[in-house]
Image (tube, grey):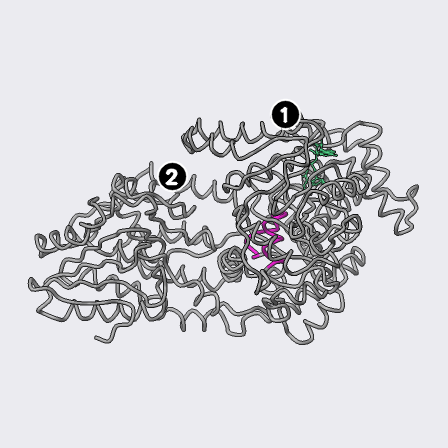
């Protein structure tokens, strides 16, 4: 056998040993070559009479296998541009054989008449776990705390396509398998043993020997589902009322959480429900059909590209300019210990970075530190953190009112009130004690960085480092380049964001930067709909059903209606709109100034809030001030409003590209999902245009909406040019390096 990804030998007892070891990689994945090797090994084991059984293990210290090679899959997904040329049927036919090859091979291995065992020393996810499930016996290491098992495919829009949806429910029962497959959460070796996913636990050094011993002792092994009279543990949905109810509930819960936007989850449910009723051979073919259907959906392509590939690339600092030494942070200062500063101090300390937290008084700074104390206490009480580690984390935060305390800091993040003069004062005071190389980052959410940098004596070291609230939960940081910001400063800032384990995107300076500017279009479209007389409940439900995390009016409440009024008035002034005749402004003014309904912070805005700050109901009296014209939402209206919400945001993203505010499609996609929750099943705003619509249909739809509702939807020259050339955003704005960003 000519194997590239496995080492293979046969011992004196006739037990073959296949060691999975993809060359040049720290972790095994199921590359095309690895699948070909598994096919060859299966053939050899099935046909070579000298082989009495097989043990599979891994040659990697990191684990057994992380699953399918999504890099290969993602590159097959295409870079975007035009939608697929072939018909669904042609693609299905072409892909069935390829899709079934590993599935069919694993089934051959399972039924080859010889015992097959696997030794799992570390992580086995997705396809890795599916290979293990096709073995008759699984031994897992009990001394590797990093070991995890799971079928995470659903998280990136796929379904397990190598037997996972058929073997796991047959092994642990439908009820236990459903959440594991639908949600894709991983589980430990101990949990696997308790559920019956593995049969034996042993120290890492002994797993192969244990697997061999089992193979020797069980020459006639069969999978449980190949034994006569096999019954699925707990029963099957169509025969057992209890399991039937579970399946019905799962369907309902899925619909209420995903609104049918995620084809993978829908297909997983159907695949389990249909596959569990028939013998496993038929079940596996059903699975392959659903797998192909799922994989061909634009949602899967978009989610793999953004949520897996781009996330991985940005998480490794893909935007970091080359040629600058990596910074190890010895000390970082945070100025302003309010909501944001307190959160920033916590994430720094959590990452092990000594942090100086400054405010106007020692008491104010100490109050900010208390935020970390509360988070640490919560983690300790939940058993997530030891008291010792919690104390060590808190000891890293030094609250102070003395700027001298942050002498020697590598970086400063300023998070004082949103006031240009105050920020200028802070910049001067900080720079007086900072070294020449220290970076000054501002967490401003609205003030242009180039303007703020005017107060700096070292504008090349001045940069925007924009966090999102709550800092400890939000994974994104938007880095904003001012006109004079240097590459060295950008490199250091990216090192910082990666050090605190967040994902950086890099954008150029402009009002609202990238995220605030585009996100604002969602809330404003909600306000437009309101002023057209569409009932608030329709606006909110359609927003959520479009895939946004909250309705547009609820988001406005969260931001603060007083802030929205301020911004609207400023925009009206800037654009010369007559405030007297602007209905939206008048309506907002009535809510804020007459009714005192400024949003969530006051417990009342568009919604009434309960004492925990959760929306209790839409405020019924809103209707007094509005003339409601639309109080029912038939499917055609739902589609229209959905497109208005999503297309409006995507058009704004295209404008940001044209103006050079953003220059890399990955930044735009990941930024839109992580910053403001743009419908994740679309892969983000660029992928929504590229893959969900296709560039030409998108431009046509935006034009139609512009004709119907106004020029805010009108495609810009960039979109028209891309449509004429059939280009997608990933063709036009591929991973750019940082030169363009610095120059733009
Ligand atoms: P906040 O009002 O909660 O906190 C501001 C803190 O700055 C207060 O503790 C105040 O005492 C302190 N401060 C004021 N003057 C100071 C001085 N001279 N020296 C030291 N400390 C001083 O405000 P916040 O919500 O944390 O926002 C801070 C910054 O972050 C603002 O620029 C804001 O635009 C930006 N931001 C806020 C959010 C958000 O969701 N709140 C999100 C992103 C960015």
Residue tagged 1: 610
Q: Which residues are magenta?
A: 667-683
The image quarter in which residue 552 lies: top right
Q: Residue at x 17, y 62 (%)?
A: 17
Quick one: SS at disc 2? helix
Q: Which residue is painted at 73% across and 36% down in the image? A: 560
Query: Relative to 468, is 590 on the left or the right?
Result: right
Magenta stretch: dominant secondary structure? helix
Q: Work out whether residue 636 can be spotted.
A: no
Taking 378 as reference, is 723 above or below it? Answer: below
Dividing the picture into quadrants, the one containing residue 420 is: top right
Residue 387 visible, this orientation: yes
The image position of residue 76, as x and y in percent, is 47, 70
Residue at mark 2? 246
**Which element carries disc 1, helix, strand or loop?**
loop
User: Split into 4 quadrants, where in the image is the N terminus?
Assistant: bottom left
Q: Residues within 10 Å of mark 1 (few under 14, many from 20)?
A: few
């Amino acid at each position: 056998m000519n194997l590239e990804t496995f080492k293979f030998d046969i011992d004196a007892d006739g037990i073959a040993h296949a060691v999975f070891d993809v060359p040049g990689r720290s972790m095994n994945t199921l590359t095309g070559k690895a699948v070909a090797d598994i096919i060859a090994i299966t053939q050899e084991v099935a046909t070579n009479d000298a082989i009495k059984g097989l043990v599979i293990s891994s040659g990697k210290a990191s684990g057994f296998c992380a699953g399918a090679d999504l890099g290969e899959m993602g590159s097959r997904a295409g870079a975007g541009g035009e939608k697929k040329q072939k018909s669904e049927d042609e693609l299905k036919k072409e892909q069935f054989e390829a899709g079934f090859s590993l599935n069919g091979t694993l089934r051959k291995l399972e039924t080859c008449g010889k015992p097959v065992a696997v030794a799992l020393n570390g992580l086995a996810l997705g396809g890795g776990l599916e290979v293990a499930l096709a073995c008759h016996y699984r031994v897992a290491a009990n001394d590797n705390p990093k070991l995890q098992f799971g079928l995470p495919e659903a998280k990136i829009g796929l379904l397990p396509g190598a037997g996972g949806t058929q073997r796991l429910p047959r092994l642990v029962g439908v009820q236990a398998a459903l959440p594991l497959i639908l949600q894709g959460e991983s589980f430990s070796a101990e949990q696997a043993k308790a559920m019956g996913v593995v049969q034996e636990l042993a120290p890492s050094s002994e797993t192969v020997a244990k697997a061999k011993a089992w193979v020797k002792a069980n020459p006639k092994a069969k999978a449980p589902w190949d034994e006569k009279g096999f019954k699925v543990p707990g029963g099957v949905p169509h025969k057992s009322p209890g399991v039937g109810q579970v399946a019905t509930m799962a369907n309902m819960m899925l619909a209420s959480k995903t609104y049918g936007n995620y084809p993978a989850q829908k297909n997983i449910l159907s695949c389990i429900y249909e596959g569990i009723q028939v013998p496993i051979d038929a079940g596996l073919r059903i699975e392959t059909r659903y797998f192909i259907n799922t994989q061909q959906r634009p949602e899967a392509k978009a989610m793999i590209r953004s949520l897996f590939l781009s996330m991985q690339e940005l998480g490794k600092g893909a935007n970091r300019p080359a040629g600058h030494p990596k910074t190890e942070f010895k000390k970082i200062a945070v100025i302003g210990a309010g909501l944001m500063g307190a959160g920033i101090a916590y994430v720094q300390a959590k990452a092990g970075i000594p942090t100086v937290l400054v405010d106007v008084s020692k008491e104010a700074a100490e109050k900010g530190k208390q935020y970390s104390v509360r988070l640490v206490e919560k983690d300790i009480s939940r058993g997530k953190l030891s008291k010792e580690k919690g104390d060590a984390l808190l000891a890293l935060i030094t609250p102070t009112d003395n700027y001298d305390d942050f002498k020697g800091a590598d970086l400063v993040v300023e998070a004082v009130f949103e006031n240009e003069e105050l920020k200028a004062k802070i910049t001067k005071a900080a720079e007086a004690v900072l070294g020449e190389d220290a970076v000054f980052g501002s967490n401003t959410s609205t003030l242009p960085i180039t303007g703020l940098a005017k107060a700096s004596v070292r504008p090349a070291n001045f940069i925007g480092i924009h966090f999102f609230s709550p800092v400890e939960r939000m994974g994104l940081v938007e880095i904003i380049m001012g006109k004079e910001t240097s590459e060295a400063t950008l490199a250091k800032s990216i090192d910082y964001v990666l050090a605190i384990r967040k994902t950086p995107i890099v954008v150029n300076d402009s009002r609202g930067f990238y995220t605030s500017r585009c996100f604002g279009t969602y809330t404003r479209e909600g306000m437009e709909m309101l002023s057209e007389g569409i009932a608030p409940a329709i606006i909110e439900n359609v927003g959520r059903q479009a895939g946004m995390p909250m309705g547009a009016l609820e988001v406005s409440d969260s931001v603060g209606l007083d802030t929205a009024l301020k911004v609207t008035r400023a925009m009206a002034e800037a654009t010369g709109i007559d405030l007297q005749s602007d209905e939206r402004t008048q309506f907002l003014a009535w809510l804020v100034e007459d009714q005192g309904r400024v949003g969530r912070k006051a417990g009342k805005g568009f919604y009434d809030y309960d004492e925990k700050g959760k929306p209790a109901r839409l405020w019924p009296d809103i209707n007094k001030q509005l003339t409601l014209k639309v109080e029912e939402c038939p499917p055609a209206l739902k589609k229209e409003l959905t497109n208005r919400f999503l297309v409006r945001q995507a058009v704004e993203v295209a404008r940001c590209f044209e103006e050079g505010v953003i220059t890399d499609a990955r930044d735009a996609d990941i930024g839109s999902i992580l910053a403001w929750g743009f419908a994740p099943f679309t892969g983000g705003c660029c992928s929504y245009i590229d893959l969900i619509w296709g560039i030409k249909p998108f431009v046509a739809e935006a034009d139609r909406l512009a004709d119907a509702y106004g020029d805010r939807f009108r495609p810009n020259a960039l979109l028209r040019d891309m449509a004429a050339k059939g280009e997608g955003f990933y063709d036009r704005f591929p991973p750019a390096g940082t030169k363009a960003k610095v120059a733009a």
